[in-house]
Image (spheres, rainbow, N blue to C red):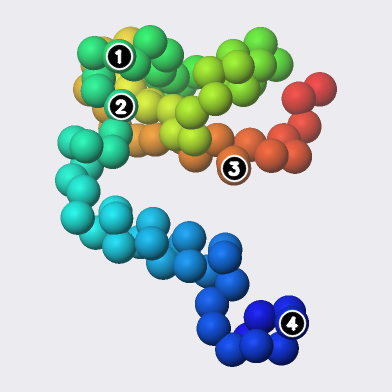
């Protein structure tokens, strides 16, 4: 129920449903950034220093690719940047 007491979807709810329907028709290829355009990756053994966290914030992506130790281009994971919220950088 909407805040005014009327039944139906709020604008936020309608937008969320529309987004879910749109995503169900798109492939990963259409949604993800092409690897050729990725100019920042982390390595599995990389320390998240203050400078690294600052760079992640500046880039502004919600996911950062993580590759094997030694800097190969083989992506083995993604760091979800929102998981860094509240991280002590001291």
Q: Which residue is mark 4?
A: 4
> CA gap, disc 1 to disc 3?
23 Å
Q: Position of residue 36 (x, y in %)?
A: 24, 13
Q: Position of residue 32 (x, y in %)?
A: 29, 34
For the point 74% across and 82% down, the residue is 4
> Can residue 48 be seen?
no
Q: Nearer the viewer, residue 82 or 17?
A: 17
Secondary structure category for the residue under label 3: helix
Q: Residue furthest right?
A: 90
Measured along the vertical axis of the image, is residue 27 above or below residue 61?
Answer: below
Q: Nearer the viewer, residue 1 or 73?
A: 1
Q: Which residue is mark 1?
A: 37
Q: Which residue is mark 3?
A: 83
Which of disc 4 and disc 3 is earlier in sequence?
A: 4
For the point 72% across and 35% down, the residue is 87
> CA gap, disc 2 to disc 1?
7 Å
For the point 57% across and 65% down, the residue is 11
Q: Nearer the viewer, residue 60 or 47?
A: 60
Task: Say which mark, if any, is on residue 33.
Answer: 2
């Amino acid at each position: 129920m909407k805040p005014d007491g009327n039944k139906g979807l709020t604008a936020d709810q309608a937008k969320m449903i529309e987004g879910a329907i749109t995503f169900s028709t798109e492939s990963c290829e259409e949604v993800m950034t092409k690897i050729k355009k990725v100019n920042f990756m982390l390595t599995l053994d990389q320390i998240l220093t203050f400078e690294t966290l600052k760079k992640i914030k500046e880039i502004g992506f919600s996911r950062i690719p993580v590759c094997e130790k030694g800097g190969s281009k083989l992506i083995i994971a993604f760091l979800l940047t929102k998981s860094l919220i509240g991280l002590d950088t001291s």
